[in-house]
Image (spheres, rainbow, N blue to C red):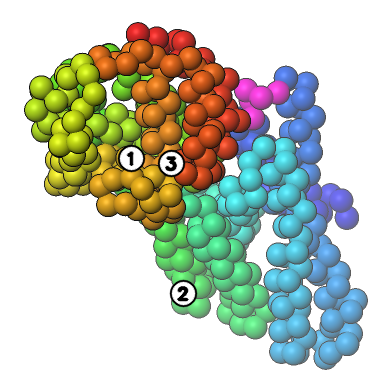
Amino acid sequence: MLYVLANYYWPRFIVSLLFVLFSLNVIKDRYSIKEQIKRGFILFFVSSPIISMIAEILNHTVNTFIIQRLFSFNSSTANIVFIAFSILCDFASLILPIYIFSKIIGENMAIAATMYIEFTLQDRFALILSTNAISYIIVYVIALIILVLVHSSDVMYISQHIDSLKWWPVLLYNLMLLALMDICYGAYFFFDELQIGTLNVQKIWLDMLLVVCCLFAASFSKLNVIVSKEHDHKIEYMKKFQDNQSDIIRDFATISEAKSGETGQHIRRVSEYTAILAKPLLENEDDVSYIKIASMMHDIGKLMIPNEIIEKPGKLTPEEYEIIKTHSTYGENLLSHNQGEIMTMARSIAYEHHEKWDGTGYPRGLKGDEISLVAQIVAVADVYDALTSRRSYKEPWNPEDAKAEIINQKGRQFSPSVVDVFEKNYAEIDNIRQTYAD
């Protein structure tokens, strides 16, 4: 019995070894040689050909001793029940091996299952199209060569972007193809013409159906890679676009600080403070990066204010103060013709960073969350730095006094949530103040 099984199944043992070699290549840099050998041994016994052989033996045993005895031997009903049972058993038998495979190679279930099913499909494809052991090897090698040719230009990309590819659609497509192959395999129980060893119209028709379906599957897999590449190109383009915005903002910020008479480190400190305050309050890291850059433009509108007012050493008159207040509106106007997330943030910040939580700020007297969150954040960063910095009209405050003033203005000038973050992270903020001191 064992001799007969070995003689019948020996080509599939070779495929199992190929599966092991492929899997070990995936994990070769993660484990020692001894650990790889141990895992390779397990991989051999959970490989799709081995599991398929076990399922096939089980199916035929159940068919012979149960299904065929419950129904009339070789009847259509018995064959239908057997095919349905075989398909269910086939899919159920893959669950545990795929789980073990995913744990051994250290990939998530979608990626591991897709890889595993690919080997299952190639094995099943060769099994259906072949008539003996030698033809199985020939068909399998041809199918493998075609698959390699389809993805020859994508191997490096797939290995470098394995987590960004859309694996679930490909996996579902392959599972449906596997079900189709099982149904085609079941056709041998209904049509005597398919059981003849020689080629005939029926067998050629069935084989061509499988070939076309497998080519569609390979094309779908290829399309997945193409779509992912296009997505990466768009992301790269957007990153360059955002980088260009960042360069523009930094240039404007440099001009603005020179015009306003503020020290060279003011904008840097406000930017760093803003990032610290934004991290717990914004949804993702990209937004934190954007606001860190956008905050540099908070006083861009001062470019439009006369120098004699900007540089005045003493207290401003009420009329001069009204002119100073217009820098918020000027800032919004200067940035209103630029698109992109960073510029949108910069526009809101420039326009609203002098609004106050209690509604007594300018230019529009916004109150509470009517003020954009990004402006609420920058308002605290800007005022703290203004208080602790020397200006032509004042000496710097003691940092602890400035901290107390920010906390005292919670719910009045500043957003309570932003002040809470300021107080909680004050040690980090004070470290920035000292690192980038004037």
Amino acid on which the number 2 mark rests in the picture: Trp
Q: Whole-percent x and y of residue 387?
A: 40, 22
Q: Is residue 47 above or below residue 256?
A: below
Which mark is first along the chain, 1 or 3? 1
Query: Do callouts 3 and 1 mark residues in contact (Cβ within 8 Å)?
Result: no
**Residue beneath label 1, please?**
353
**Residue beneath label 2, please?**
205
Q: Whole-percent x and y of residue 416?
A: 53, 43
Q: Residues within 10 Å of mark 3 (few under 14, many from 20)?
A: many
Q: Is residue 207 above or below residue 12?
A: below
Q: Residues within 10 Å of mark 2 (few under 14, many from 20)?
A: few
- Per the rendered image, the range of residues in magenta is 27-31
Residue beneath the point at 57% across and 37% down: 420
Disc 2 is placed on an element classified as: helix
Separation (CA) of disc 3 from disc 2: 79 Å
**Residue beneath label 3, please?**
413
* Quadrant assignment for the C terminus: top left
On whether residue 347 falls in the magenta region, the answer is no
Amino acid on which the number 1 mark rests in the picture: His
On whether residue 28 falls in the magenta region, the answer is yes
Q: Is residue 58 above or below residue 425?
A: below
